[in-house]
Amino acid sequence: MEWRLADELTALGERVVAASGGLIAGFEVSYGELSVNAAAAEIVEVLRFLKDAEGLKFHQLLDVCGADYPQRPLRFDIVYHLLSMTQNRRIRVKVQTDEETPVPSVAEVFPNANWYEREAFDMYGVFFSGHPDLRRLLTDYGFHGHPLRKDFPMTGYVEVRYDDELKRVVYEPVKSVEFRSWDFLSPWEGADYDVPATPLVTGPAAAGSKAP
């Protein structure tokens, strides 16, 4: 069944690329899902094509989310998930951008993108040009930074607490900022460096008994 689904998604991907008129550069089928790549500047035209084209009809925008790859010049992936009820198929559209270049808002094509784009802006700091109301959605007023960026510290920058003397909530800078250390070690591939050996404990100590 998996190979049959992969063949169907591959045929759908080829049809999407051929009918897009150059809007969609390529596609990939992985883990039973179809993903296509597009230029960020053309995302409005791409989603309108996927929504209106005969034989596709991806009428529902399920989500707009992001991913952060700090080592890349275009560090952010902006990902759109669409559903076609007539085809009973889903498709993922991915574009790339950096910290300063805005991605065109798709709220005119899918009105529910309004809040999805606000969430992506709040969490990643990605700007959406033409958005009707690009404000933070999940974090508090005056929040500093974007929590889902990989360079955002685990402790954040500001501490919120209730002050018994002032009888109100106060905001204070965090005294010790702890940055995240990302270890992408695969448990199947193993480390590419020498791991110090753990000494083997034997005798009474290993059994939990006390030495005389």
Image (tube, grey):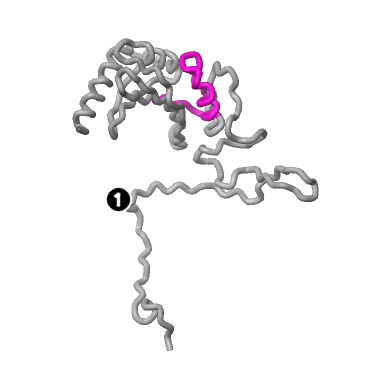
Q: Position of residue 194 (x, y in %)?
A: 35, 58
Q: Residues within 10 Å of mark 1 (few under 14, many from 20)?
A: few
* x and y percentages locating residue 48 in the rendered image: 41, 13
Residue at 28 percent across and 21 percent down: it is 13
Left or right: 21 in relation to 77: left
Query: Residue 43 sits in which quadrant?
Result: top left
Q: Which amino acid does the dot numbered 1 rest on?
A: Trp
Is 7 on the left-hand or right-hand side of 174?
A: left
Q: Secondary structure at mark 1?
A: loop
Question: Going 40% across and 78% down the picture, which residue do you hit?
Answer: 208
Residue 205 position (above or below residue 54): below
Percent coordinates x, y for residue 97 in the rendering: 47, 26
Work out whether residue 2 or residue 192 is closer to the camera in this orientation and state it: 2
Residue 89 against residue 180 in the figure, above or below: above
> Is 111 covered by the magenta stretch?
yes
Q: Is residue 69 above or below residue 181?
A: above
Q: Residue at x 44, y 20 (%)?
A: 40
Relative to 176, 84 lies left or right:
left
Image location (x, y in percent) of residue 93: 38, 24
Which quarter of the rendered picture does the N terminus lie within?
top left
Location of residue 17 (image quadrant): top left
* Residue 5 in magenta stretch: no
Q: Is residue 41 above or below residue 124?
A: above
Q: Which residue is mark 1?
A: 188
Q: Quadrant of the C terminus?
A: bottom left
The magenta stretch is 94-121
164 on left or right of 60: right
Name the outermost residue toward the bottom: 212
